[in-house]
């Protein structure tokens, strides 16, 4: 396995590890405050608590597995770089020792939660599970940026651990809340319990958000330091992306909070209907945004903080120029011109002919034109006055084929590398994932819109794949080292990733909500398509 693929796998495993941590530790906190705190012991509460603990147990085992796999991925990366086995020296590193300890603690937490599930009324068992969860959180502090700092090491580690705790309580609570609602669809008694649980979770969620803010502000000031550090580095742009996603999630949480207050004010009148039929769907979308934010957080952990790159930060003018309107390139250089440019430039400097850059410009600009056509057809379809507009999803199939053929000129059909050989390079792998996501998105959405009586799940494939595509874009990488030029390429992909996530969530809400709220969410989804298209149309490779 190449080191690039290994590091990419490590980043993905870190993301899923954070999600598993939220299920386990966040679920434990949620279960205690939202379910165990119920004064009335009922069969519904017992069923809800058992379901929640089952999900937390899955999360704990998942975290143990991802930690072990992360250690394996790191050994693969080191072996490829060093060309020798990293053992036994790797065993003496802090990364291995803390990673192994964390994996064992996660397994211990899973066993503790299984023990708790047998008799959840025993306070001593809750204390044991909480102690294991606390040890797991504290252990993770040695794997954050702050652990490698020469100054203010302990405060930064403590702030980061608290920041993570606030995040996993919020994320885990929302996921468990959504899971409880799904359980309530099968069990009427649990459904009647759901509004009171939402009301109990609301202050816990507010406390988690407050912890996030109180710890995130000083961490941001320390690691970013300046306005230019925020907008001119990959670390800063990913941090801003996380803010956007969490702000959108917080907006949905605000709707849940208002519904819970109304329900409390009315003394629980109306049961599940009294709290609002749309609230569970807001919880679903809030959870989706927070899940995506975990991938951004994992990417942040793999990037050098802005404060460490004082000489490699792009200026505001350069970042604005990356998004400013430009005349797109409509003519592609030939593959022979690109090969000659590569031979002339070698690995040190860019060629003056610009053939390599023009190839990339053409790819992005033409993809943008295709996507703009899709967006305009989707808008026409929404008017109800253009019958052929319902076929707009097929445009994604055309876009997918274009990406497959043009994205990587070193790989078949233009290059000498076979398909499998090309997959050893992380950017090529990501482009192939983008092809699969885009093709699947187009085919499934076309079937959903044009098949009589489609399967109920079929329309939801589109938003699910949009969200997947957004995550792929947010983890998209062009280089192992962050130079200013590479960042000016990455910043557009970061923006498109956020818009793709909003596009998916918008479409999800359109399917879930009644009009006019659902139709408004759908308009936002289509608007995201158009905005992504313009980013691609105006894309030009930055000067070296």
Image (cartoon, grey):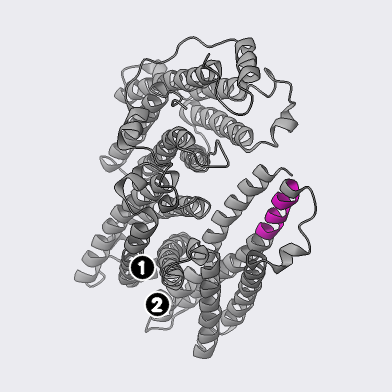
Q: Residue shown at 23%/66% (left/top)?
A: 261
Using a 10 Å C-alpha cutoff, classify the residue at mark 2 as few (fewer than 14 neighbours), some (14 to 19) or many (20 or more): some
Residue 63 at x, y = what percent? Answer: 60, 64
Residue 77 at x, y = what percent? Answer: 70, 50
Closest to the observer: 423 or 157? 157
Residue stretch in magenta: 69-80
Residue 461 at x, y = what percent? Answer: 51, 39
Q: Residue shown at 50%/27% (left/top)?
A: 446
Is 86 positioned to the left or the right of 203 in the image?
right
Closest to the observer: 208 or 391? 208
Residue under label 1: 208
Is 258 positioned to the left or the right of 339 in the image?
left
Residue under label 2: 33
Q: Earlier in the sequence, mark 1 or mark 2?
A: 2
Q: Is residue 70 magenta?
A: yes
Q: Is residue 521 magenta?
A: no
Secondary structure beneath dot 2 equals helix
The single residue placed furthest to the left in the displayed view is 265
333 versus 411 height, above or below = above
Q: Residue shown at 65%/16% (left/top)?
A: 339
């Amino acid at each position: 396995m190449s080191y690039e693929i290994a590091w990419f796998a490590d980043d993905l495993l870190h993301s899923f590890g954070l999600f598993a941590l939220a299920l386990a530790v966040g679920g434990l906190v949620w279960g205690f405050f939202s379910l165990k705190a119920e004064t009335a012991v009922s069969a519904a509460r017992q069923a809800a608590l058992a379901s929640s603990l089952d999900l937390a147990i899955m999360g704990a085992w998942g975290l143990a597995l991802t930690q072990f796999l992360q250690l394996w991925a790191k050994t693969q990366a080191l072996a490829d770089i060093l060309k020798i086995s990293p053992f036994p020296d790797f065993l003496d590193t802090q990364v291995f020792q803390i990673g192994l300890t964390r994996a064992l603690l996660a397994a211990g937490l899973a066993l503790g939660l299984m023990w708790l599930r047998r008799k959840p009324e025993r306070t001593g068992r809750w204390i044991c599970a909480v102690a294991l969860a606390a040890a797991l959180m504290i252990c993770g502090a040695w794997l954050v940026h702050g652990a490698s700092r020469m100054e203010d090491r302990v405060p930064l580690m403590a702030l980061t651990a608290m920041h993570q705790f606030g995040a996993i309580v919020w994320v885990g609570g929302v996921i468990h809340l959504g899971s409880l609602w799904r359980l309530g669809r099968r069990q009427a008694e649990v459904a009647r319990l759901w509004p009171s649980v939402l009301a109990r979770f609301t202050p816990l969620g507010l406390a988690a958000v407050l912890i996030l803010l109180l710890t995130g502000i000083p961490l941001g000031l320390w690691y970013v330091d300046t306005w230019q550090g925020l907008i001119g580095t990959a670390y800063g742009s990913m941090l801003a992306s996380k803010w956007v996603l969490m702000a959108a999630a917080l907006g949905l949480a605000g709707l849940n909070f208002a519904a819970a207050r109304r329900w409390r004010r009315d003394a629980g009148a109306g049961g599940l209907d009294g709290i609002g039929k749309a609230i569970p769907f807001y919880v679903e979308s809030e959870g989706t945004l927070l899940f995506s934010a975990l991938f951004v957080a994992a990417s942040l952990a793999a990037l050098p903080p802005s404060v460490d790159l004082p000489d490699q930060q792009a200026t505001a003018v350069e970042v604005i120029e990356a998004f400013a309107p430009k005349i797109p390139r409509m003519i592609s250089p030939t593959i022979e011109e690109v090969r000659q440019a590569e031979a002339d430039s070698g690995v040190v400097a860019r060629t003056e002919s610009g053939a390599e850059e023009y190839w990339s410009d053409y790819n992005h600009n033409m993809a943008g034109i295709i996507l703009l056509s899709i967006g305009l057809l989707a808008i026409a379809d929404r008017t109800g006055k253009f019958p052929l507009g319902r076929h707009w999803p097929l445009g994604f199939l055309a876009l997918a084929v274009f990406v497959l053929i043009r994205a990587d000129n070193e790989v078949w059909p233009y290059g000498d590398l076979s398909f499998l050989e090309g997959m050893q390079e992380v950017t090529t792998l990501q482009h192939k994932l983008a092809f699969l996501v885009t093709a699947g998105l187009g085919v499934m959405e076309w079937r959903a819109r044009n098949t009589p009586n489609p399967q109920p799940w079929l329309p939801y494939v589109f938003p699910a794949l949009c969200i997947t595509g957004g995550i792929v874009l947010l983890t998209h990488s062009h280089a192992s080292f962050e130079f200013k030029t590479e960042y000016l390429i990455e910043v557009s992909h970061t923006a498109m990733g956020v818009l793709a996530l909003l596009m998916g969530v918008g479409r999800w809400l359109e399917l879930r909500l009644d009009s006019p709220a659902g139709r408004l969410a759908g308009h936002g989804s289509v608007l995201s398509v158009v905005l992504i298209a313009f980013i691609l149309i105006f894309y030009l490779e930055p000067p070296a």
